[in-house]
Image (tube, rainbow, N blue to C red):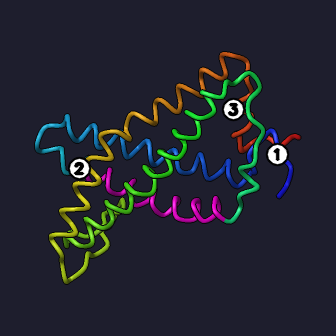
Amino acid sequence: MTAPSMAYAMGARWFHWMTAVPLIGCVGTVLKAQQAPKEDKGKWMFRHKSLGLLTGMIVAPRVAYRIMGRSGYNVIGLPGTSSTESVLAKAGHAFLYVFMTVMPATGIAMGLYGGKGLPFFWTTFAGFEQTNGTIAKNTFQIHKQLGVYGKYMIPVHAGAAVMHATRGQAIFARMNPFRAARG
């Protein structure tokens, strides 16, 4: 294993931001759908499902990269960070990994087993001919319950990064894909 670095590996940085954009879009579009008039809900849910499928397409290789490229995540803790903050950060990141993998997986399962297919921006991929309402229902319940809590973790994560930045800790330099790694 390589020595800890000040910054994440370039692949980790790119996967972070490539996942963040559609994931935040998923949360935003489902919140918009919940507030939209009935005639607009379908449009916003189509966007939500499209972004969810895109998130799943990015998360699958991201998780594989994380498992196989563990040294890319071997970074030095931020100077001035307490052990409590470190534990909370690890727990928050673990929850975000669960959120960004389980949400697309359950959404995809709902579309496939429910027979409605998988919306993807300009098209819809067909669902299974042999539907299974029990799987669709159970995955919907997981998706809905996890979504209730997960939507709060994204702003908590971003808020923690801003907090570190206001302390003068180089949090954004560690995850910036446009900056060369140092140390």
In the image, which disc is placed on residue 172?
3
Name the quadrant containing residue 105. bottom left
**Which of 53 and 60 lies nearest the eye of the viewer?**
60
Check disc 2 and report the residue beneath it: 43
Residue located 11% across and 42% down the image: 38
Q: Secondary structure at mark 3?
A: helix
In the rendered image of this protein, does residue 34 appear above or below residue 120? above
> Viewed as shown, does residue 38 lie left or right of 63?
left
Q: How many marks?
A: 3
In the rendered image of this protein, does residue 104 appear above or below residue 17? below
Among the two numbered marks 3 and 2 on one chain, the one whose residue lies closer to the N terminus: 2
Q: Find residue 5 and report its horizontal and vertical position in percent.
A: 82, 43
Q: Amino acid at mark 1?
A: Pro
Among the two numbered marks 2 and 1 on one chain, the one whose residue lies closer to the N terminus: 1
Among the two numbered marks 1 and 3 on one chain, the one whose residue lies closer to the N terminus: 1
121 magenta-colored: no
Looking at the rendered image, the quarter that the N terminus falls into is bottom right
Residue located 18% across and 75% down the image: 132
Query: Distance between the Cα atoms at labels 1 and 3?
Result: 17 Å
Q: Amino acid at mark 2?
A: Lys
Check disc 1 and report the residue beneath it: 4
Name the quadrant containing residue 112. bottom left
**The residue positioned farthest toward the left in the image shown:** 38
Q: What stretch of residues is rendered in magenta? A: 45-67
**Which of 183 and 36 lies nearest the eye of the viewer?**
183
In the rendered image of this protein, does residue 25 appear above or below residue 143? above
